[in-house]
Structures are given as C-alpha cells and as structure tokens.
Amino acid sequence: MEKQIVGEKAAQFVKDGMVIGLGTGSTVFYTIQKLGLLVKQGLSIKGIPTSFQTERLAKENGIPLANFHEIEQIDIAIDGADEVNPELDLIKGGGGALLREKIIARAARTFIVVADTSKMVDRLGTFQLPVEVIPFGYEMTEKHIRSLGSDLHIRIVNGQAFKTDNGNYIFDCNFPNITNPKQLEQDLNMIPGVVENGLFVGMADIVITLDIEKNIVIKKSKQSV
Ligand SMILES: O=C[C@H](O)[C@H](O)[C@H](O)COP(=O)(O)O
C-alpha cells in the first residue's frame, strides 16, 4: 500500500535526540506507527503534534510529546499533503489541520512530505483549497474570498459546520488551475477573518513519493539542495 510505504520511509530520517513535528492524516499515520516501534526499540525523540487526533495517536504509540516552551527547535516535521506540484508546493488541510501544520512546518529545520502517487499533480487546484476562518463575521469573509474568483462552501461534517482544533470554520474553495500559488496564499491571508490557508509554498524540503514502477522517489526542493 502506497501510503504505508512512503509513510514508513520518512522514519529513516529521524535520528536519536531529535524533536519531530508530527503531521496529521492517513499517510503520516504510518510514520507515527513506525516511530512508535522505533521508540520501543530505544530511539529517543520528542514529538510535537499538529492536531488532537495526532496527539492521541502518538500517545497510543508511546511517543513522548513536548510542549513548545520545552524545546529549542523542531528538527524535522513530517506530514502528508493533498496535492504536490513539480515545484513541491502543496495544498494541505483536507483533514482541517492546516493551521497547526503550517506553524510546525515553518518552525522545523527540515520539512518532509509523504505523498502517494495520487497526490502528485502538474498544477495545484483540482483539490479544493481549505481556508480556515474565524466564526465571527464569516459571511463577510466568504464574500471577500469569492471576490478573489473562488466558488466555495463551508465544510460540513455530520450535518454541522466543521470546527477545527482552534474552534474555527473551514471554507473549501474552488480555485482550479492555481497559476501563482504564492500570490494566492498571500491574497487569501490578507482578508480579515482568514486565519490561514492550505497553500504551503516553498516550504517542503523533501517529498517522499513513488514512481510509476512503485519505487520510492525522494524529491528535494531547490532550497534544500
Ligand atoms: O489537514 C490535513 C492534512 O493537511 C493532511 O496532511 C492532508 O489532508 C493529507 O492527508 P492524507 O495523508 O490522509 O491524505
């Protein structure tokens, strides 16, 4: 299974004594399981989770966790993605964890992305872009996002507006064919009420994926080589 192969591969980058940002989702699930096994075998690490879901998973797998004030730096953050383009820019947030994920990815010295082949795209935008907004005045925020050219809807789960771990809403925004991800990332974040969006531009250092023959491929970004 592709997610398991790329997820487990990322664990090889983790060394004794490191602080690891633990991403959210069904791919990094396998990284966390693998790290749990390595911890049982004696690996000493501390994890910083990007969501309550990941916090629970890390605890179940015996990975010691740390708070921000207890650490000096995050050595590596490992996370999944919903789309990855050839420049290794990403859309993330399918699980609604994008804000904490971006804080931790930005804080990490190295950001590693684990992505099965279905995530690799020529251009970002087929996957609807998640945008986290505060509940206050979200109807106004919606209008401003629409004015950037997007059709959008508030994310509904189990018949109710989905709330992130930060108590915010998610708008899933239709921006097909994103030609300038950096510009769009900045334009969205300029709108009052937008907390963060799921474009991660120029952040990934390494993407672990597979080629068409299902061999593991490690792509490195320009800034990391
Ligand atoms: O909010 C969720 C995260 O950004 C995930 O990393 C992303 O949605 C990919 O998740 P998965 O590995 O389950 O496809």
Image: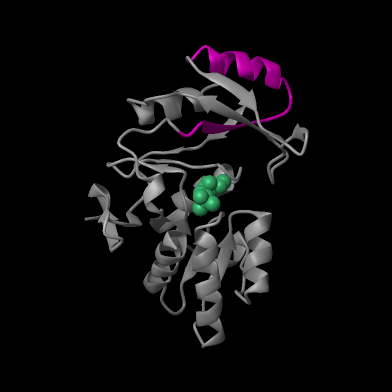
Q: Is residue 127 above or below residue 14?
A: above
Q: Report x, y in % for residue 109.
A: 39, 58
Q: Residue at x 32, y 45 (%)?
A: 88
Place residue 146 in its image quadrant.
top right
Place residue 26 in its image quadrant.
bottom right
Q: Residue at x 50, y 58 (%)?
A: 27
Q: Is residue 117 above or below residue 43?
A: above
Q: Residue at x 27, y 54 (%)?
A: 212
Place residue 90 in its image quadrant.
top left
Magenta stretch containing residue 135, yes or no?
yes
- Side of 103 relative to 135 (left or right): left
Residue nearest the viewer, comparing 191 with 152:
152
Name the residue furthest right: 159
Q: Is residue 207 above or below residue 85?
A: below
- Side of 183 relative to 4 (left or right): left
Q: Is residue 11 above or below residue 210?
A: below
Q: Residue at x 28, y 41 (%)?
A: 87
Q: Quadrant of the C terminus?
A: bottom left
Q: Which residues are magenta?
A: 127-148
Q: Is any atom of residue 193 visible in this view? A: no
Magenta stretch containing residue 32, yes or no?
no
